[in-house]
Amino acid sequence: MCRLLVLLAWFVAAPVVHADEGIWLVLDSTAYRPFGALTHMSYQDVPRDGETRRWVDPERSGGIVIVPVIPAAAPTVYMYDPVPGWRLESMRPITDPMARDGILRQRLDETTRAVVAEQGLSTRIIAEVVEPGRGHLRQLGDRGGEPALLVQRAGLSMIQLGWDDRQLLLAANFRRFEASGTRAQPERERGLRRVRFVGAPIEGDVPMERWSADDAALFLSKVEQAWAKLLAEGLRPQPDLPRVGRGETVLLTIGGREQTFAGRLWKQEDNLAYVATRDGGISLIELAD
């Protein structure tokens, strides 16, 4: 897939009633397509020594399949890994209801408008793009000097279930652009926020059954809440975060269990621990389900 594809969809996200200041949002298309992680994410808790965390299909064995191909000249082989396809299939109890009638898109767009309004801004437009970049800003047209925010995925998808289906994970890079007033470089990047959200693990012998019950109502509710927190943080200017040393970790209590995360605790508010990371980003760690 080409890294910069033609714009998938543009649509007005609010009535054209301009407030004091507005913002134009360009979202990566995976905001509306949840994925299932195959392996442990680096911003999750630190695994114990020797511990391997990887998704495994309970009904099928994984691994690389070697397929022989015998052309006219000489025999050869190619390798095919079926596991990613199995993982996509395992997510269908969630992805199918989320795609039905565009419910996930509708609810996330409503949440986006509400969060932006809480920041004292007006949402001018929400655009969905495959791998948004600086070049897509030109397609927004005349913004009247108002800023644009590129929301890029940080990894396979902006919204994922963890490798064991117990944790909701969100990760995005928020890049703020403003008009520079020059022809040579009409857009100037004014800020970059790297923000992740790590949900508290849900309980149950088969977590997918809990997520997918009642047309995945629990998943939809949790995604709305997590997206609101992620976006609110991404809209704010970069805070004065503490410096994080190489290999530095912090011990947190998640759902009554102690877990270690890479980084340094910046602050704790309500049910969230804000952990500064070495790359200048921040992880929002949910402390209880």
Image (cartoon, grey):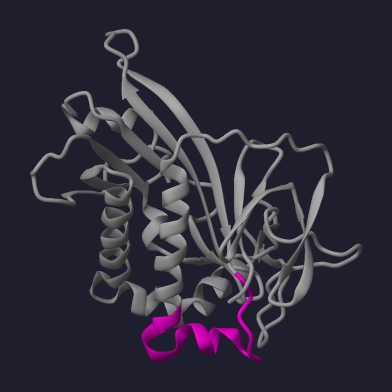
Image quadrant occupied by the C terminus: bottom right
Is 156 located above or below residue 235 in the figure? below
4 in relation to 153, above or below:
above
Q: Nearer the viewer, residue 106 or 254?
A: 254
Residue appearing at x 28%, y 59% in the figure: 109
Range drawn in magenta: 200-218
Place of residue 142 in the rendered image (x, y in percent of width and height, measured from the top left): 16, 26
* In the depicted structure, whether residue 120 falls above or below residue 157: above
Residue nearest the viewer, comparing 99 with 203: 203
Identify which residue is drawn at 8% across, 44% down. Answer: 16
Q: Position of residue 159 (x, y in %)?
A: 48, 61
Residue 82 seen = no
Q: How many marks?
A: 0
Judge whether residue 86 is colored magenta: no
- In the displayed structure, 187 sits above or below 286; it is above
Q: Place residue 78 in its image quadrant.
A: bottom right
Left or right: 75 with respect to 196? Answer: right
Question: Which residue is farthest left?
Answer: 16
Q: Is residue 61 left or right of residue 227?
A: right
Give percent across and percent down for residue 144: 16, 25
